[in-house]
Image (cartoon, rainbow, N blue to C red):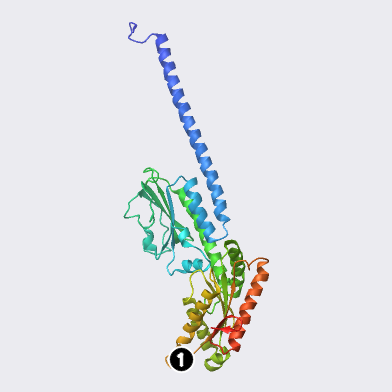
Amino acid sequence: MTYTATGKLPPQTDHAAQALDLAAENQALRARMAYLLEQAERNHSIMTRHQAFDLDIVGAGNFPELVGTIFRVLPIISELDSVTLTLIDEDADIRHVMAKLDVVFEDFPDLIFAEDLDALGFDLGRRNAYSAAPKPLLGMYDPLRHARPFPNAPAGLQSVALVPLLRNRRIIGSLNLGSCDPTRFTPSLGTDFIEHMASIIAICLENVISNEMLKYIGLTDSLTGVYNRRYIDRRLLEEIARARRQSYPISFMYIDIDHFKRVNDTVGHGGGDEVLREVAGRIKNELRASDALARFGGEEFVVLLIDANLDSAAFVAERIRASVAGNMITLSPELQLSVTVSIGVACLNPGEAEGDAEVIARAWIARADELLYEAKESGRNRVVSVSGKAA
C-alpha cells in the first residue's frame, strides 16, 4: 500500500473505503429492516390468530366447548408445548353442577380444580381474593414447584408462565402456559399480552359457568336435588336417538311412594318433604353415574337406565324397592316412618326405537305408568316389569 507524504490514504483509496463502509451499513440496515418486517408480519399473524381465538371462546355455548377450545387452539396459535387451566372450586360446586350436566372431566386432563387460593402459588399479600391483583409468575420450570399447575408436563418443558384469571379483582383461577424454549418466559418479559388474553378467558369462563349454573337450576328439582321433568323429557329424546344409533336397550322406571298422602297427613308437609329427599337419596344410591333420576312431580320419580335390558332394570328396581322399604326413615329422634314404593319398569329394545322420538318417548312413559298402576293394584311395595307379573 502506498502512502503520501502526509501519511494519509490517497483520495481514491479513501473513497473506496467509504464506499465499503456505506455498503456494509446499507446491508446491515436492509437486514435489520427485513428482520423488523418479518417480526411485524409474525406479530400480525399472531394477533390475527388470537383475535379469531377470542371470537371462538366468546361464542362458546357451554363449559365443555369453551374449555375444549382453549386446550385445542391456544397451544397452536401461541406455539406452546403445554396449556393447563386451574379453577378455584372451594365447595366443589362447579364440579357438581358440571357432572350433573354430563360433563366428562376425563376428556380434559389439563383442567385442574383447586380448593383454595394458596394452591395457585401466587403472592397474595394478605391472602385475600380481593387484595391487590397478583402479577403473572414467569420463570424456569421446576418439576416440584410446578407439579400442581402442570400435572402432565411434557418432556423437555423449560419455562412457564402462571397467569391469574381475574374478575373484578377476584381470582377465579390461573391460566398456565409452558414452553420447551428456556427463553420463552423469563422474569424480564413484558406480560401485557398474556394478561389481556387471560382477562378475556376469565370473562368467558365466568359467563359460561354462570349460565351452566342457571341451566342446572332450571333442570333440577329444588327440593330433592335430583333432575326435574324438563330435564328427563330432553334426556329421553337424546338417549332414544343414541340407543337407535348404537343398538342397545334402555329401560325406564316409574316410581311412586305408596300412601304418600297419609305421610303428609301424619307428619305434615315438612316431614313429607324430608321423606321425598330421603327416598330420592336411596334411589340414587342404587344407580350408576350414567343413569338419570328425576322427580316427575308430587311423590313420583322416574329413572332412565342406559344400556340395560328388562331383566337388568327389574333387578335394579327391586334393589330400590328393598332399599326404601328395608329401613325406616328417621324424621327426629322420636319419630320414624316406614315408607314403601311401587315401581313399573318398561324397556325399549334395539329395533323398537325407530320413528319419531317424541312419540316413542310418550308411549314408553305411558307403558311404565301402566305397569306402575298394576303394581299399585296388586298390593303396592312391589315391582312390575311385565304386564300381569309382579316381582
Q: Is residue 203 visible?
A: no
Give the structural element (helix, strand or loop) at label 1: strand
Q: Residue at x 40, y 50 (%)?
A: 161
* Most distant residue in the front direction: 389
Q: Is residue 108 above or below residue 253?
A: above
Quadrant location, the N terminus: top left
Picture layout, residue 300 above or below residue 144: below
- Residue under numbered circle 1: 336
Extreme residue toward the left, this view: 144
> From where the camera sits, is residue 366 visible?
yes
Res 347 → quadrant: bottom right
* Camera-nearest residue between 248 and 174: 248
10 Å crowding of disc 1: few (<14), some (14-19), many (20+): few
The amino acid type, in three-letter code, at marker 1 is Gln
- Measured as percent of width and height from the top left, residue 382 is found at 54, 85
- Up/down of 223 relative to 259, above or below: above
Number of numbered discs visible in the structure rendering: 1
**Could you tell me residue 330's position as x and y percent?**
45, 88
* Residue in the foreground of this view, choosing between 181 and 108: 108
Q: Is residue 363 left or right of residue 186?
A: right
Tell me where residue 90 sits by quadrant: bottom left
Name which residue lies at 50% across and 83% down.
321
Q: Residue at x 47, y 48 (%)?
A: 75
Where is residue 279? Give x, y as percent. 50, 82
Q: Position of residue 278 (x, y in %)?
A: 48, 82
Choose top left, top right, bottom left or bottom right for residue 349. bottom right
